[in-house]
Amino acid sequence: MILFEAILVALVASLFTGGSLKRLEAEHLTGEWVLLVLLPLQLAWPAIARRIGLPCGLSIIIWLLMMAALAVVLFLNAPRRWMLAFAGLGIALNVLVIGFNGAMPVSLKATSEIGATRSDAGAALESECLHEAIDEDTWLVMLADVIAVPGPAWQRGVVSVGDLLLSFGLAAWVWAGSRGVRC
């Protein structure tokens, strides 16, 4: 959710301060079709994999491959738009922590900071492939979902450093692209 919110805020702020959708439309990226297909697909992937009955291990491998492809496309465009390197780095960090752990580790402490009980959060994580509770066997805890994002119930969540970098990078790109700024 934080990704969508960051992009929306950047776009609205840009439009209210002289940016335009026409300039953003003129912003062409190498491999942009990959971004347009894989960004929404990776968000919907857990539900799709569950619906078609894929085993968790295979589902995570496919998700990691999608994310790696997204990171590559973002890094390929970084020489033209430096902020896309932040987005690519965010994805790469998420791929790294998920690859090492077999799922994205989630801090139950952080979930309790936004109002969920640890037992409810733990039970919710048990039923999904892409996330798991942090435990003593977790690798790269600092890259896991450990940052509590407060707010109204529909907006609250727990995010990773990678999520923040991805959100910042794409929001900065939307801002610069809609304003016609070359950087």
Image (tube, rainbow, N blue to C red):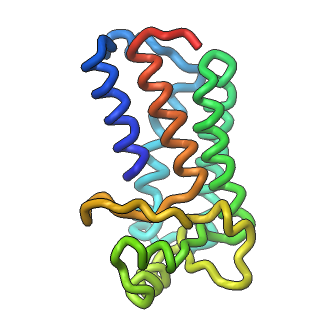
Up the image or down, 5 lies above or below 113; here it is: above
Residue 158, percent from left and from top:
46, 64
Q: Give the tally of numbered discs.
A: 0
The one of 57 and 74 positioned closer to us in this rendering: 74
Q: Residue furthest bottom?
A: 119
**Residue 26 found in image quarter:** top left
Quarter holding the C terminus is top right
**Residue 25 found in image quarter:** top left
Up the image or down, 27 lies above or below 36; here it is: above
Residue 11, percent from left and from top:
33, 27
Tell me what residue is drawn at x 38 percent, y 10 percent: 23
Residue 131, percent from left and from top:
53, 71
Question: Is 31 left or right of 95, judged from the image as shown?
Answer: left
Tell me what residue is drawn at x 56 percent, y 58 percent: 160
Question: Is 49 left or right of 61, judged from the image as shown?
Answer: left
The one of 31 and 13 positioned closer to us in this rendering: 13
